[in-house]
Image (cartoon, grey):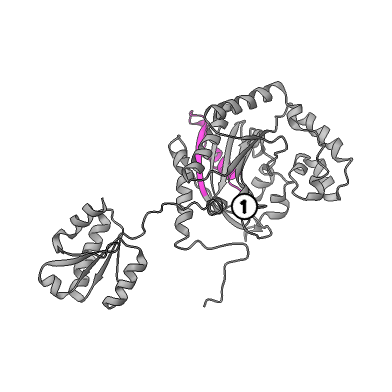
Amino acid sequence: MSTFKAPKGTYDLIPPDSAKYLAVREAIAAPLRNSGYGYIETPGFENVELFARGVGESTDIVTKEMYAFETKGGDRLALRPEGTASVLRAALEANLHKAGNLPVKLWYSGSYYRYERPQKGRYRHFSQVGAEAIGAEDPALDAELLILADQAYRSLGLSDFRILLNSLGDQECRPVYRTALQDFLRGLDLDEDTLRRAEINPLRVLDDKRESVQKQLGDAPLLRDYLCDACKAYHEEVRELITAAGVAFEDDPKLVRGLDYYTRTTFEFVHDGLGSQSAVGGGGRYDGLSEMIGGPALPSVGWALGVDRTVLALEAEGVELELPATTSVFAVPLGEEARRVLFAKVTELRKNGIAADFSYGGKGLKGAMKNANRSGARYTVVAGERDLAEGVVQLKDMESGEQTAVGVNEIVAELEARLG
């Protein structure tokens, strides 16, 4: 046994479970690729200031959860705790917004890192698939992303998730609400850290998960009562568009995402089968983020869906994904000549798109057939000296147990026909 283990709060993805994660990533990405979103990949670490400015210096992510370090050259870097700031930084650096085709539509997949108390559904290293539409202010764009996420989850067979929807207003109406909320919070019995947070960003207090705080927020002013006419009209159009598309949602006037950059549309995907860590994804509009990190005004919207939590949601609903067989054909050679012949046939099968594997290590027939069973292959091809002398191999159907002799030169075509 190795003396090393995965760091606390992390996990290894290993077969066969890793196939589920790949299937989830593919299902989430499929509707994005079908809707004009191109793939982007950013570094696993960025300048600390990118997240301090974009995510927000008062957020738990920046103050408590970010893995920050200093390089030998004196640069202050951080492992990325979320994807939006990195994707927007990359788009600005590459001047994608100047190509004349707005919005710039991008999707990504990768690992993210936050120093949190590990528990089921909350890890220090986690995986997300995300989408960002950069450079356009349009309710239809917000609706598109909500519809695509709903489509992705339903394609996986999930049905017990809910979409929570709210509007956080804009630079015109939110300051008025902010003042009203601060006045309300100052009258509560809150600890010093929470009161300090209320002065910096009072909306973050609404996102506090502690029961001692939540039970005091019952009469807190609601942002929807302070929305300006433009924000009300914008939000109503988003609601109408997703309703027309058959996407169910719940209005949640207290919904506040844990990042500072959100404006107007904000939403969260929750699954009640996951206990306290019920959020499986979320996102919203972030019209001012580009200016926060030194770019031009680029109103944008996006989301990120957690791969880890989506897998847990599938398990909670008892959904079994139809995963492609890792191996369709397993070759068992008996003797040196058979090794050469069958290895060539396995290579030919793979070139023709058939998943094939081989009995390595010179095992006898009994041990090799055990490996064939474990592989999950539908067919096993067995050949020994006598078979080759007759110009045939033995093809065994692992489901029915039926075994037939097939010509050596016909075996590839026979398997292609049987496997479709």
Task: Specify whether 242 is left or right of 415.
Answer: right
Can the viewer see residue 269 in this picture?
Answer: yes
The image shows residue 221, relative to residue 358, as above or below, that is: above
Tell which residue pokes out farthest to the left in this image. Answer: 390
**Chain part drawn in magenta:** 80-109
Report the residue at 31% width, 58% height from top: 355
Task: Specify whether 210 is left or right of 400.
Answer: right
Q: Looking at numbered disc 1 in the image, what kind of residue is underneath it?
A: Leu
Give the camera-side residue of 187 and 137: 187
Callout 1: few (<14), some (14-19), or many (20+) C-alpha neighbours within 10 Å? some
* Tag 1 secondary structure: helix
Report the residue at 68% width, 57% height from top: 116
Give the camera-side residue of 45 and 252: 252
Can the viewer see residue 135 in this picture?
Answer: no
Task: Specify whether 158 is left or right of 375.
Answer: right
Q: Position of residue 70 (x, y in %)?
A: 65, 58
Let me know if residue 87 is in the magenta part. Answer: yes
Q: Position of residue 234 (x, y in %)?
A: 63, 25
The image shows residue 169, relative to residue 387, as above or below, that is: above
Q: Position of residue 62 (x, y in %)?
A: 70, 50
Let me know if residue 27 is in the magenta part. Answer: no
Task: Specify whether 221 is left or right of 402.
Answer: right
Report the residue at 68% width, 24% height from top: 232
Q: Position of residue 81 (x, y in %)?
A: 62, 51
Instruction: Report which residue position mark 1 lands on.
Output: 274
Tag count: 1
